[in-house]
Amino acid sequence: MKRLLILGAGTGGTMMANHLHKELDKNLWEIDIIDERQIHYYQPGYLFLPFDIYEPEDIIKPIKKFIPNGVNLINDKIEKIIPEENLVKMANGDQLHYDLLIIATGNDIAPEEVPGMKGSEWQKSVFDFYTFDGALALRNKLREWEGGNLVVHITEMPIKCPVAPLEFTFLSDSFFKEKNMRDKVNITYVTPLSGAFTKPKATETLEHLLVEKNIKIESDFAIESVDNENKKIIDYAGREIPFDLLVTIPTNKGNEVMARSGLGDDLNYVPTHKATLQSKKHENIFVIGDATDVPASKAGSVAHFEAEILTENILRYIAGEPLKETFDGHANCFVETGGGKALLIDFNYTHEPVEGTFPFPGIGPLRLLQESRMNHMSKLAFRWIYWNMLLKGTHIPFISTQMQEEGKHFN
Amino acid sequence: MEKVIAGKTIAVNDEGYMTDLSQWSPEIANELAKEASIELSPRHFEVLEFLQNQYKNEVPLTIRRVGASGVVDIKEFYALFPAGPLKMSSKIAGIPKPASCI
């Protein structure tokens, strides 16, 4: 019997367990998946929790519900990977030998990277919404907050879901309007980038929306520290921005296990071949989702497209065939713009988001890079698709793994 | 696009970043720095050389990586190349604008 070991039962790991359970010969392969947590979080829901749009129970379910029968779920902490010996050491002392390893350990916030960020004001006037606890604490704060300077801030790139901070900003504007207190709130969007987003055409559209909603943008801000006493963020050039409520996206880092195992880069991301998803260092290790260092967005949609290609490549690897170099960095993201609208962006390594129609070229029904109610309804419907189709590895109709160029208005 | 600087013709893109590192010279760097009101010191050149080596080795550049390099810390990096040090230093070093952006 050979063993395929999956580290992490989040979006990427769970999808791989489901795909490979269907594909691998059960007489030859044992599949194990390890996660120290019991709960699977629907991470896109963290955006809606602070505004009381979703309740906690909408976004948490038991991990085991999504792991197919026949796949062994191990509920324990990983200590270290020893790739030279094909071993994973567990915190409880157990050692697991693998023939094939899939790393799907994701990424997490690391507020301790910035002096003062996790200081005396943490979860009092300084919040994150990239964790369940953070989003819930921020919800409680927003329920009673009476206004002032709201600063939405990105520490450094790359981050999980690079559009989420903008969505949070747009939803704040709507939230305070609905509470009839928008005039009591100044909203500032602070980014280390030179503009609102990482891609030029989408940046144009998104900056227009910021202006329209009376949101100030502070760009090229590389934070040095958070001053808890005077409630200011300060950058390396000495620029200071005061806040009454700071919602920050701290530095994002891959799992510490990668650092302990010598498998990660300076942010604990695993160097990964960007078209095959094989580790650059060890040929029997594959990587999926936020844990990789590939230059694609860290997002569930990306992990979904990766899973389809990775499944094929793992079967090829087992059969001794050359891997397919077909992952193109495809990402597909709904961007909430507030007031019950959203826009949709669809892009890959080489093509930035542009206007057009999706998924049917020339028809739609969804419009790319333009606000619409239908995009917003699709984003809300996506939660059902996530729990019921995506995690189970069911192909989503009409959505191709590789990005389609047709129906998009490239220059 | 082409640009004449320090008596030499160099290839640049529409944002003024050089597109051929082999055309770079310390004299050109001095002139590019002047356009950004910076007078280059030997310390600046140490940083420029580090950036060029990273680029040649295809290591993507971020402020964090420069700060952790041991060549210069982030505070000094800002002091040497004020306001957007990574972009400014890349331009003067003759390498492409860093794409820390995904």
Image: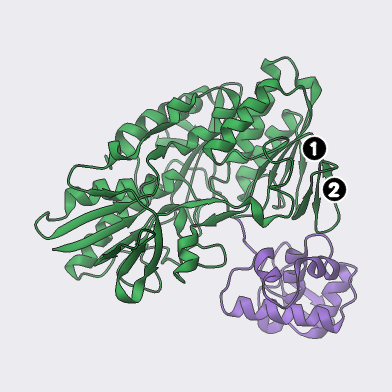
Chain colours: A green, B purple
- Say which quadrant the N terminus of chain A sits in: bottom left
User: Which residue is found at the position 50% from the left and 24% from the top?
Assistant: A54
Residue A243, numbered circle:
1
The residue located at (63%, 38%) in the rendering is: A166
Q: Can you tell which quarter of the image residue A99 is in?
A: bottom left
Choose between A299 and A21: the one closer to the eye: A21
Q: Is residue A8 left or right of residue B80?
A: left
Q: Is residue A116 visible?
A: yes
Q: Residue furthest front?
A: A92
- Mark 1 vs mark 2, CA separation in Å: 10 Å
Q: How many marks?
A: 2
Query: Disc 2: which chain?
Result: A
Q: Is residue B98 left or right of residue A22?
A: right
Which sits in the foreground, A327 or A170?
A: A170
Amino acid type assigned to the residue bearing label 2 in the image: Glu
Q: Amino acid at mark 1?
A: Phe
Disc 1 is attached to a residue of which chain? A
The x and y percentages for residue A149 are: 80, 32
**A275 in relation to B5, above or below:** above
Q: Where is residue A226 shown, x and y percent of the image?
A: 77, 49
A91 sits left or right of A324 in the view: right
For disc 2, the marked residue is A240
